[in-house]
Amino acid sequence: MSLFGTSSSFGTGGTGVFGSTTTDSHNPMKDVEVTSPPDDSISCLAFSPPSLPGNFLIGGSWANDVRCWEVQDNGQTVPKAQQMHTGPVLDVCWSDDGSKVFTASCDKTAKMWDLNSNQAMQIAQHDGPIRTIHWIKAPNYSCVMTGSWDKTLKFWDTRSPNPMMSLQMPERCYCADVVYPMAVVATAERGLIVYQLENQPSEFRRIDSPLKHQHRCVAIFKDKQNKPTGFALGSIEGRVAIHYINPPNPAKDNFTFKCHRSNGTNTTTPQDIYAVNAIAFHPVHGTLATVGSDGRFSFWDKDARTKLKTSEQLDQPITACCFNHNGNIFAYSSSYDWSKVERKGPALEPRPPPQASHGAVHAGAGTGCRFQAWSRPICVI
Amino acid sequence: MGRKKKKQLKPWCWYCNRDFDDEKILIQHQKAKHFKCHICHKKLYTGPGLAIHCMQVHKETIDAVPNAIPGRTDIELEIYGMEGIPEKDMQDRRRVLEQKTQDGQKKKQNQDDSDEEDDDEAGTSYQQPAAQQAAYVPPMTQPGMPQGMAHASYSGIPHMMPGVPPMMPGVPPMMPGMPPGMMPMGGMIPGPGMPPVMPGLPSGMPPHVIRPGIPHMATAVPGAPPGMPARPVIPPATTQSSVSKPLFPSAVQSQQTASGQSPSASTTEATKSTFPAYTQASATSTNPSSSTVAKPPATVTSKPANLATTSATSKLMHPDEDISLEERRAQLPRYQRLIPRLGQATMAAAPAGAVGGIMPPQQPGMRHPIHGQYGAPPQVMPGFMPGGMPPYGQSAPMVPPFQGGPPMGMRPPVMSPGGRY
């Protein structure tokens, strides 16, 4: 078993994929670019569930809008619809039947967007910006879960203005993920809470963080029986922790690995350590993708504990990513994430982002996240 | 404390002074960090072995062991695991360790690079909640558990109810034991189980349909506890229903056996990562986080702690304050202009006129400062809706809302101020 050690950058291997010698740092992977991207950084991406025929991609941005594109089989993207909030949109999610999209924003509200009628209705209200939103479909109830910087986790029946339930968290919610019957929330001050959602959501366990830096993103993975069994947690320190909820041997089964750092084994120059902005698991193969502030995305196999691939470096950080429902398409967004700010003082407004945001869709032949399968990228956003 | 016969109690690496639990892990570490060829990544067994390999295979000489601390880089010294360590260094190490343990045990080692110290702390801190849980588990497990989960919950509920308010933090780990057993019963057990767990919820329950299939439960809830013993219908359904839910029922087993032991074990080990992937370089940047960890978590309103984001060998590409990038960005004035102030939030569904447009009409004054940043969207619109209004092409009713207005019917409130863009 090869452990996560050195990171051999995929670029140095140099297969024929990136043919030209002049690397286009804007789209070095030659993936298909999505048309009509938002005007400010993209904060979140979500593909439609399998209940919808075709692939629809939703992206929320710091320009207060949520956009919907249809991603066709030939890789072309068609803008379909758009909704607005009054503050930057921080998270989006789909309902399980693909008819509604839920959006969470800094304007402290969450909205339900009925795609058939193209109407959006407010369904949630917090005292602070809402950072995460997820749809929970349980056998005996359905609801929307919102996590906010006001340190509460609220559950909403979309028909009522009052929450069905409100759970207090120790700190502001920074990221969350839901795979029924499990939900994981990572908060400020390295808090980590697992909730169980059967019958009604309740706190299951608070976990001592396996990471030593601020939590940034979390994604639940499933076992061979398709049950949620653990999660991957990313921090601002270029590191991801794989943590199982009830492993047979925690010392051996749980581990962390480094990623999104500037130089691999070269220990002479100081290493730049970048934040892991998002983690997504391939729905079929169980491999995971991480995207970072360094402008790269990487694919990993957590069971073999190996890195599968790292992309070329883009000119901007990658802020969000997701797989479509069958794992054939990988979408990622490249936009400024404010990580490189002068450290002079809070009064100084940071430089405006160098250019508008871009999203990319990267597709494989569907046989998995292996080197060979990615030789023919189909779409890029 | 045990035998001091073992060399220094815990195996440690002579090249970089790191501690390990096991000599096997130490050897793996040495092979990956110190005895790995930088050209072909082949892992050798010893320092001299690496030197010979580089000479023979790559015709290159190396004069220092990679990733070794200064003073311990001798390539000629044949060290394998704990064998071959010069006696003098062994004694030095023993002395240093004794000094450390004398100086107030583990508290002092907050700043230490080694991961093991941290997870010892995590372990000790975790024992307390486990101990608390242990105090509460016996009343629940003894009567009920052997007979199956449903019975346990039955007998457990009366125990729980009086004790619920003080043990709220301890309750959650045990709660999952009930629901998995209850699922086949269509949620009847959770009915009585809910009031103790969510004191605030029952008041809110009747108006909300949490369980659309069992609306009668709302009225049955208050009468549930006295009615509990009279539910003979439950037992047949409560055989080993854990099969469908491996995740949380295993937590039930952990309750039965060692109460809080397994959660504590899993989390203490989780913080330790003895893999070679965890180098010193990154460990140095963990120092600053100890300052944020030591603080109590409730200091949000005060100025956020600063991370020390640079160290000798690495630099964290993140602003200094320990708030998330999104929080930092959301504080900027340009992102705050449109957020409705308190009292102006629109709760109800958007009026029919604002088809999709969310800009509240009652805040025209807030729009004026917007320029540049938000200038683009209307121009994007023409390309954005290429006539294919119904995204899903499913039903005709969807089309009329768009055909009535101008093509940009989605955002009439925005378009009305006209030449702003």
Image: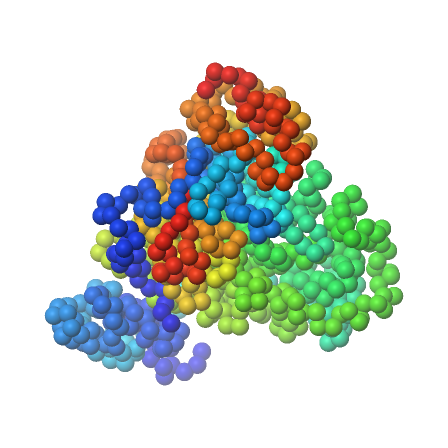
The quarter in which the N terminus of chain A is drawn is: bottom left
Asked whether residue B185 appears in the rendered view, the answer is yes
Front residue of B242 and B262: B242
* Residue at x 87%, y 66% (from the top left corner): B230
The quarter in which the C terminus of chain A is drawn is: top left
Residue B252 is situated, as x and y percent measured from the top left of the image, at 66, 68
Q: Is B88 situated left or right of A374 in this image?
A: left
Say which quarter of the image contains residue A103: top right
Residue A118 is situated, as x and y percent measured from the top left of the image, at 61, 34
Front residue of A212 and A329: A329
Say if B319 sits above or below A238 in the image: above
Q: Is A357 situated left or right of A168 in this image?
A: left
Front residue of B120 and A288: A288
Say if B226 sits above or below A18 in the image: below
* Residue at x 56%, y 45% (from the top left corner): A93
Say if B395 sits above or below B106 in the image: above
Asked whether residue B170 appears in the rendered view, the answer is no
* Residue at x 47%, y 17% (from the top left corner): B420
Q: Is B283 situated left or right of B302 in this image?
A: left
* Residue at x 52%, y 47% (from the top left corner): A55
Residue A288 is situated, as x and y percent measured from the top left of the image, at 45, 58
Q: Is A371 situated left or right of B333 in this image?
A: left
